[in-house]
Image (tube, rainbow, N blue to C red):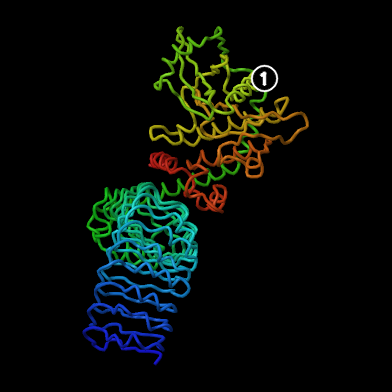
Amino acid sequence: MKELVLVATNLMGAIPTSIFNISSLLSLSLSENNLSSNLPSNIGLWLPNLHGLLLVGNKLTGIIPESISNASKLTLLDLNSNAFTDDILPTTIGNFSASLENIQADHCGIRGNIPNEIALGKLQILDLSNNRLQGSIPDDICPLKNMGDLRLNENELFGLIPECLGNITSLRYLYLNSNKLAFVIPTRLGNLKDISEINMSSNSLNGNLPPQLGSFKVATLIDFSMNQFTGKIPSTIIGLQNLVTLSLAHNKFQGSIPDLFGSMVSLEFLDLSYNDLSDVIPKSLETLSHLSYLNVSFNKLRGEIPNGVPFANFTIQPFMLNDALCDAPKFQVPACHTSSFHHLRKKRVALALYILLQIASILLATTFVFLFIKCRRYKSLSNVDLLPTITPPRITYQQFFRATNGFSESNLLGMGSFGSVYKAILEDTTVFAIKVFNLQVEGAFKSFDIECEIMRHIRHRNLTKVISSCSNLDFKALVLEYMPNGSLEKWLYSYNYFLDMLQRLDIMIDVACALEYLHPDYSMPLVHCDLKPNNILLDDDFVAHVSDFGIAKLLDFGENVTHTNTIATFGYIAPKFGLEGLVSTSCDVYSYGILLMETFTRLKPTDEMFFEDMTMKRWINESLPNAISHVIDTNLLKLEEEHLTAVVL
């Protein structure tokens, strides 16, 4: 006898021990019966050829005998839906390393830890869900290169999700939901490029969702609900065109619902309820023809509920308890204004906004033309200091100390790689900025010498002026012109500050003029090497001044490229030069392009949405000219819309 199949035949009582003496058996299936009692202690001793053992859906109790490992050719072990009461499997399970491919033991009442010996080399399916397993997920699982289905959900597992799970690149199904797992999702899980379903709901996971989740290109189900995730919904998720089910409910996500959700054409189930999402429900969701379930309740959404397909089939429940949603009476929320005057106003605003966006795209596309014209206009002034030169007497360390209130944190303006900048008020009430170098940092001495040498020879209205210095063996500092409006970084990313479209354009023109002076106009071309928002300072009139020449490089006559050992800030480095330590004026031009895009989008080049092939440049190129509203800083659009509303009315 090679196969014994007695499925759903209403067998009762204990399994006869004689069955386990049929040494010729290849497959034994006694599933879906009422068999009870313990498994025989000699279950595997006389089954040397057994490949499949299926005891699903019975009432078996006790332990899983160690002798089962003597069935050394077993490839499938299915014990689902029984009532075992001891450790999941004996440590002798390791004897199956050359054969066992499929272990299924869900709903078995098993408790204890997952044994390290479960790491069987040929294992493809491991289902230990719906038990009472405790402890952490062992790293020993990670070398299982053939694993395609891992289900540890509905247990009491705690601790971290092992980062090395990202090494099991064969995984298609990963279910870790309903445990007590904590901390963040490892970024290495982005390596699971063939994952089809991933469920980590109902844990205590927190932090931001890693942008690497955008690698799940073939995923059809993602469920991270019932956790404590924060931050914005990562835009990288939006590129998952095969996604059918997405649940991010019961977290602490903030910001708006990404408009590009409308591009997820396969989406049928979307649950964003119980978060802190704000702004409007994107009308782009109307294009999701397969969407049959949507829930955005218990957020802070406002504005009109879209009325196209599939919204026509929804009830009020998915929209309940938001800030200010409005629509027709069917949703039992306040009606939006529907007068003809209101519609006319909306059309006018929409038309005006469309015109504004086209103008904005033209501005961005032709910025360099404006820069060239304006820089040439400034050229006659390039070598003239337009601000009065303030030359204090030589300043001692004691004067520095008093002027900064003992280098107090209340006087701290900012910190850089080589030191800190303080606001200093001298006894005659003159205000300066003092850059104090941290001489404990490698490279600080050289940075001080470079900045002193460079700033002694250059002079331009868009460069920060070095007025004096203090230098001895244990203290080095520069006295700089004070910039009351701080850095461009502050004005872009602080909630209490805002720059309108023209201010941003003027700032970028100022920076371009500074570069035009440093590159071709200066007697020896000078490469700044670290152009970024923190190094653009704004004076009383919001004139921009390029600062921090601590890693700048001078090019000799006829020299186009030089070498540096100090790498600039990641995200602003020209790939062709910076990563190899080679710099040229082209590096500054590249950094300027990044800075230009960042200034008008209010997104850093290191934002989580930019990874692998999706760079800031590519994102903007793909959005112009028809989707500029997706890339322009939303605060700019809101301000212009309010202004245009007032104009057209």
Q: Is the residue 56 above or below the residue 473 in the image? A: below
Look at the image and tell me whether residue 184 can be seen.
Answer: yes
Residue nearest the observer in this picture, 463 or 140: 140
Count of number-bearing discs: 1
Residue 456 at x, y percent in the picture: 64, 18
Residue 214 at x, y percent in the picture: 47, 57
Residue lying farthest to the bottom in this orientation: 1
SS under mark 1: loop
Quadrant holding the C terminus: top left
Q: Is the residue 516 above or below the residue 56 in the image? A: above
User: Which residue position holds label 1?
Assistant: 457
Look at the image and tell me whether residue 301 can be seen.
Answer: no
Quadrant holding the N terminus: bottom left
Quarter-of-image position of residue 129: bottom left
Residue nearest the observer in this picture, 405 or 220: 405
Q: Is the residue 69 above or below the residue 474 in the image? A: below
Decide if residue 558 is on the left or right side of residue 192: right
Amino acid at dot 1: His
